[in-house]
Image: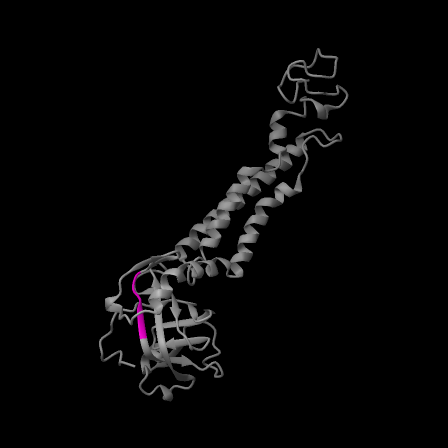
Amino acid sequence: MRCIGCDFDLSETRSGRCPECGRDFDPANPATFAGEHNTRFARRLATPPGWPMAIAAALVAVLILRTRFSPGVHFGHSIVALLASLLLGLLYAGRLVAAGIGHFMLPRRRPRVVPIAPKRWLAAPAIVAFALVLNGAGASQRLALWLDRRTLDPIANGVAIEPSAWTPVSVASGRVARGAVWDDIEVAIFDPDTPLGQMSGPFRWEKDGSDPRWIAHARHFEGAEEVPGIVRVRLARLAVFPLEGHGYGGGFALAWAYAPGAPDTFFKGARFTFHRYSGDWFVSRGWIMSLEDEPSDQSPSP
């Protein structure tokens, strides 16, 4: 019979109070002292998770929110968040099993030697679930756009800039590697009232002989009326801001776009697809091809 607080030997103590640390105990109640079953090891196993688990869950939540802190999905951040979530899940499951073993080892008398404390067990899953709900509601992406607009608004409303003359800038959600700002530009869009415009996702393919290719890329603006579901829209201003390091790299990226007066979904050639996000700002739902200047025979001026 040893003291739970200081591990002092209580076998010769008759006062009901530990002479070393003053902790009360009842010789008739094994739950009040360390004994054959109520050991320090068993109590440590049975203790519910504390602040370290909550901090780990908060870090995982930040990684989850970071996956959407930009246009579209960043694959690198998504993989890191997934691995961190799996690791946290394994740690949580191991902690749960250990607590079950610890409670099984402890004496069964009431009051319970170590409380189950369901609130402490639910804290970590609740933090991660809250981050997933925020991501589903687009909270982190809206925060990213709100922060990015402080830098991008003056550029979007400034002078026209061709891709070849673009100077990279840093924003909260990444680094704009190559962008462009056009005045009085014509875009080809999918009419949402046609079967083509109602297809899900930004990728629309047409089988042209033996090679699948983009419909708008194959026909571009010339003869676009020959392709059912393609209509033209002229915009007074279009600014595109692809972010560096998104997608698989190479010629693909994800982007913000500023297009006053554009329809909710628009498509310029085969270059980028955007959906309205906030006011005159759009976000790409999939990859966009790089905005490097193309040979004139492939990309006629609008």
Is 179 colored magenta in this rendering?
A: yes
Image location of residue 242, percent across then percent down: 34, 64
Image quadrant where residue 133 sits: bottom right
Is 38 colored magenta in this rendering?
A: no
Residue at image location 53% in from the left, 55% down from the top: 132
Image location of residue 272, percent across then percent down: 36, 72
- Can residue 254 be seen in this snapshot? no
Q: Between residues 136 and 160, which one lies in front from this camera angle?
A: 160
- Report the residue that reaches farthest toward the right: 28
Image quadrant where residue 173 sits: bottom left
The region drawn magenta spans: 177-182
Image location of residue 237, percent across then percent down: 35, 75
Residue 192 vertical position relative to residue 149 in the rendered view, above or below: below
Q: Quadrant of the N terminus?
A: top right
- Report the residue that reaches farthest toward the top: 12
Residue at image location 44% in from the left, 75% down from the top: 265
- Can residue 269 be seen in this snapshot? yes
Image location of residue 195, percent across then percent down: 48, 82
Image quadrant where residue 113 sits: top right
Q: Between residues 122 and 148, which one lies in front from this camera angle?
A: 148
Residue at image location 68% in from the left, 16% down from the top: 18
